[in-house]
Image (cartoon, rainbow, N blue to C red):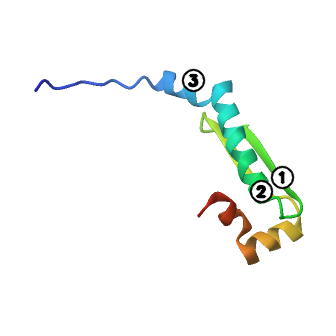
Amino acid sequence: MAKVHFDLNSQGVEALLSSPEMRAVVDGYANQVAGRAASMSGLDYDVESGGIHRAVGAVRAGSVQAYRDALENKTLNKALGV
């Protein structure tokens, strides 16, 4: 069997991971997680391009009450299915 040689194009992967299409995918997942954790008061989500050259989604507790709920009831973990 012949050996296969594969060269990864780093710039192409970086362009793919930071593309508007990938940001839309990440935004969709962040929105789903935020929706599942809707019982948590003060929940907000954000999608940003981080310094690591890719789309990054974050679901955060936006208030002290939401943070406490996340700690006590593991709301975000449950929303992620962890």
Give yes or no for contact between labels 3 and 1 (Cβ–Cβ under 8 Å).
Answer: no
**Which numbered disc, 2 or 1, marks the residue that appears first in the sequence?**
1
Q: Is residue 40 above or below residue 16?
A: below
Q: Which mark is residue 68?
A: none
Please indicate, yes or no, whether residue 65 appears anywhere in the rendered image. yes
Q: Is residue 82 left or right of residue 47?
A: left
Q: Is residue 77 above or below residue 26?
A: below
Q: CA distance from mark 3 to mark 1?
A: 27 Å
Q: Which mark is residue 44?
A: 1
Q: CA distance from mark 3 to mark 2?
A: 26 Å
The kind of residue tagged 2 is Arg
Locate residue 70, reporting x and y percent. 76, 69
Please indicate, yes or no, whether residue 50 appears anywhere in the rendered image. no
Q: Mark 3 = which residue?
A: 15
Q: Is residue 60 above or below residue 74?
A: above
Give yes or no for contact between labels 2 and 1 (Cβ–Cβ under 8 Å).
Answer: yes
Q: Quadrant of the N terminus?
A: top left
- For the point 70% across and 32% down, which residue is it? 24
- For the point 84% across and 66% down, which residue is it? 66
Locate residue 20, reporting x and y percent. 68, 25
Q: Nearer the viewer, residue 37 or 6?
A: 37
Residue lying furthest bottom in this view? 72
The kind of residue tagged 1 is Asp
Q: Mark 2 = which residue?
A: 60
Give SS at disc 2.
Answer: strand
Q: Quadrant of residue 65?
A: bottom right
Give SS at disc 1.
Answer: strand
- Dot 3, crowdedness within 10 Å: few (<14), some or many (≥20)? some
- Dot 2, crowdedness within 10 Å: few (<14), some or many (≥20)? some
- For the point 70% across and 71% down, which residue is it? 74
